[in-house]
Image: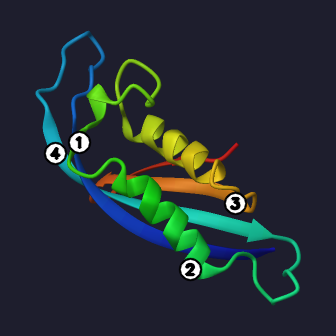
Amino acid sequence: MYTVIVETSFSAVHSVTLPGGASEPPHGHEWHVRAHFAAEALNEFGMVVDFEEAKRALSHVAAQLEQTNLNENPEIPGPCPTAEVMARHLFEQIRRKGLSSLKRVEVTEASGCVAAYEP
């Protein structure tokens, strides 16, 4: 299996409802995103995916979230935009760009705290 990973980051605010029903106050993060692309065999150019194409897709999706309040984004599903929810949202948005070799998205909300989504 061959794997290619591209990374980017964006700054955004969110608020999460905690167990017990309390809500965190809105706060910001520098969200770091890693998109993993994989294939059993390389394409005719010797690649899983073109790094530039993958980076462009990831950067475009992240740019849509830059300096926003994620709780106010109607495209993000669920009651609150946790790191897990964001990993799936980013995965689905990148896949919509036609990059079928995307296999996993990881989101780091804070140092040492990583959530991932892979179907």
* For the residues bearing labels 4 and 2, Cβ distance under 8 angstroms: no
State how far apart marks 4 and 3 are (Cα). Answer: 29 Å
State how far apart marks 2 and 1 are (Cα). Answer: 25 Å
* For the residues bearing labels 2 and 1, Cβ distance under 8 angstroms: no
Judge by depth and name the residue closer to the eye, 93 or 78: 93
Q: Residue at x 58, y 53 (%)?
A: 94
State how far apart marks 4 and 1 are (Cα). Answer: 9 Å
Q: Residue at x 65, y 51 (%)?
A: 95
For label 1, count other residues whose C-alpha is less than 10 Å away and answer few (under 14), some (14-19) or many (20+): some
- For the N terminus, the image quarter is bottom right
Judge by depth and name the residue closer to the eye, 96 or 70: 96
Q: Nearer the viewer, mark 4 or mark 3?
A: 3
Three-letter amino acid code of the residue under disc 4:
Gly
Q: Nearer the viewer, mark 4 or mark 2?
A: 2
The residue carrying mark 1 is 68
The residue carrying mark 4 is 28
**Seen in the image, is 108 located left or right of residue 34?**
left
Q: Position of residue 105 (x, y in %)?
A: 55, 54
Three-letter amino acid code of the residue under disc 3:
Leu
The residue carrying mark 2 is 52
State how far apart marks 3 and 2 are (Cα). Answer: 12 Å
Corner quadrant of residue 59: bottom left
* For the residues bearing labels 4 and 3, Cβ distance under 8 angstroms: no
State how far apart marks 1 and 3 are (Cα). Answer: 25 Å
Q: Residue at x 59, y 70 (%)?
A: 54
Q: Does label 3 or label 2 sit earlier along the sequence? A: 2
Q: Does label 1 or label 3 sit earlier along the sequence? A: 1
The residue carrying mark 3 is 99
Q: Does label 4 or label 2 sit earlier along the sequence? A: 4
